Structure formats: C-alpha cells, structure tokens
Image: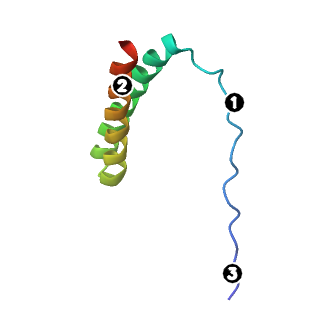
Amino acid sequence: MTTTLMRPATVTHIQQQPMATPEKADEAARYIGQMTGEMALLARGARLDTLAYFLEMARIEAQTMASRLAR
C-alpha cells in the first residue's frame, strides 16, 4: 500500500492595511461586529456550533470596543 503525503495548503499573502486612526477604530469595530454576526448566523445554520460560538464572542467584543471608542 502506498501512502501519499498531502502538502499543507499554501497560505496566501495577506496585504497589511495601514493602522486605523483612533477615530476610524470605532467604525472598524462596528463593521467587524456586523460581519461576525452574519458569519455566526451562517455557522449556526450549518450546525458549526463551536465556530458560531467563537464568532458570536468576536461580535460581542467588537460591539463593546465600538461603544468604548465612540465615547
């Protein structure tokens, strides 16, 4: 029997974005909160419960940060 080793998936280079200024950080946090909320619903619908849980935690954290930064 022959065993074939699979190569790990190639990680594509992620272009780094410039650092957000404090006034833009709250906007970024709000956007992240919206996107992670939508992804959590998608994960929950696909019965990916653990992933949905972590996405929901990210949503809550993003909303908390957006609220703090907006002050």
Q: Is residue 58 left or right of residue 4?
A: left
How many other residues sit within 10 Å of disc 2, few (<14), some (14-19) or many (≥20)?
A: some
Give the quarter of the image for residue 14.
top right
| Kind of element beneath mark 1 | loop
Could you say which disc has been placed on residue 51 in the image? Answer: none
Kind of residue indicated by mark 3: Thr
Q: Earlier in the sequence, mark 1 or mark 2?
A: 1
* Residue 12 horizontal/vertical position (percent): 70, 42
Rendered residue at 68%/29% (across/down)? 16
Q: Is residue 1 above or below residue 57?
A: below
* Residue 61 horizontal/vertical position (percent): 35, 34
Residue with the most extreme bottom position:
1
Which residue is labeled 1 in the image? 15
Could you say which disc has been placed on residue 3 in the image? Answer: 3
Q: Is residue 69 above or below residue 10?
A: above
Q: Earlier in the sequence, mark 2 or mark 3?
A: 3
Which residue is labeled 2 in the image? 34
Rendered residue at 33%/46% (across/down)? 52
| C-alpha separation, residue under disc 3 versus residue under disc 1 | 36 Å
| Kind of element beneath mark 2 | helix
| C-alpha separation, residue under disc 1 versus residue under disc 2 | 22 Å
Give the quarter of the image for residue 31.
top left
Q: Is residue 33 left or right of residue 7?
A: left
In this rendering, the label closer to the viewer, 3 or 1 = 1
Q: Mark 1 and 2 residues: CB-CB less than 8 Å, in contact?
A: no
* Residue 71 horizontal/vertical position (percent): 35, 12
Q: Earlier in the sequence, mark 3 or mark 1?
A: 3
